[in-house]
Image (cartoon, rainbow, N blue to C red):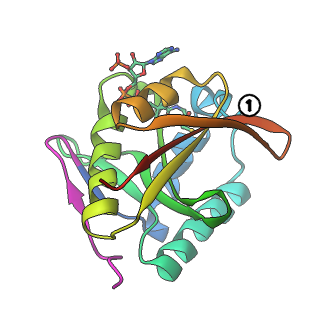
Amino acid sequence: MKAIHASLETPRLILRPMLATDFDALLLIFTDALVMAAFDEPPFTPAQMERWLQRNLDHQTEYGYGLFSVILKQTGELIGDCGLEMMAELGGAELGYDFRSHFWNQGYATEAATAVRDHAFEVLKLPQLISLIRVGNRASRRVAEKVGMQLVEELERYETHYWKYAIRQK
Ligand SMILES: CC(C)(COP(=O)(O)OP(=O)(O)OC[C@H]1O[C@@H](n2cnc3c(N)ncnc32)[C@H](O)[C@@H]1OP(=O)(O)O)[C@@H](O)C(=O)NCCC(=O)NCCS
């Protein structure tokens, strides 16, 4: 069953499928220097943003789920992305999240990721979620822990060291 049209609601947020028209709002996230420091990358160019967005739109079409756009109910702004990307070679779908730095440390990523976790297990019936977190990204690790994930191993991928977190369907 494809659940591509599913939107999720939390007390403060709406998570809805990503749209091509989210380009400008997403570029605000991926040109945010504090966000990009977490990836040790410079800000995205518009062409990189276009490729990233198209990849997620293609993923949504192929799997019926992907990274949601996260909308702050109070203002209607797109403040982050949070959702799933299939990484079969690593044991399942990856739970990921990125938020504009202006909105950090207010519990938004945890609120969004918890809703995605529940959707993944209860609706999509995925057996396991993983998160690949660059070693040293303590905020991301803390979100993974608060969502109930546990450290499984440390691994190297494309010359970068990651903590691999995971949670299984109960
Ligand atoms: C990771 C990220 C999504 C977290 O978003 P957020 O909305 O601030 O997350 P929350 O507010 O739900 O939780 C953040 C937690 O990390 C903690 N934290 C933040 N910075 C920290 C640091 N430098 N060291 C340790 N803990 C830190 C906060 O205190 C909070 O934990 P607490 O609730 O126990 O106090 C955000 O920092 C971000 O977009 N980073 C850049 C992109 C990124 O790293 N994406 C993840 C890739 S794996």
**Residue 129 on the magenta span:** no
Quarter of the image with the N terminus in it: bottom left
Q: Kindly give the residue lying farthest to the right in the view shown.
A: 159
According to the image, label 1 marks what residue? 40
In the displayed structure, does residue 76 sit left or right of residue 105? Answer: left
Q: Main secondary structure of the magenta part?
A: loop
| Tally of numbered discs | 1
Where is 13 relative to 121, above or below?
A: above
The residue under the point 72% across, 59% down is 47
- Which residue is depicted at the point 47% across and 59% down? 84
Residue 138, position as x, y percentages in the image: 54, 21
Q: Is residue 81 above or below residue 1?
A: above
Name the secondary structure under disc 1: loop
Please give the name of the residue rendered at 27% of the width and 54% of the height, measured from the top-left corner: 118
Extreme residue in the bottom direction: 1
Q: Outermost residue toward the front?
A: 170
Q: Residues within 10 Å of mark 1 (few under 14, many from 20)?
A: few
Across and down, in percent, residue 11 comes to 13, 42
**Is the CB–ligand 1 distance for label 1 below 8 Å?**
no
Q: Quadrant of ligand 1?
A: top left
Residue 2 covered by magenta stretch: yes
**Residues shaded magenta:** 1-13
| Residue closer to the observer: 6 or 170 | 170
Image height check: is 121 above or below 162?
below
Q: Is residue 84 left or right of residue 10?
A: right
In terms of image quadrants, where is residue 18? Answer: bottom left
User: Which residue is painted at 24% across and 48% down in the image?
Assistant: 76
Q: Given the image, on which type of amino acid does mark 1 rest?
A: Asp
Question: Depth check: 88 or 110 in front?
Answer: 88
Question: Residue 13, image x and y in percent?
Answer: 23, 46
Most foreground residue, 60 or 88 = 88
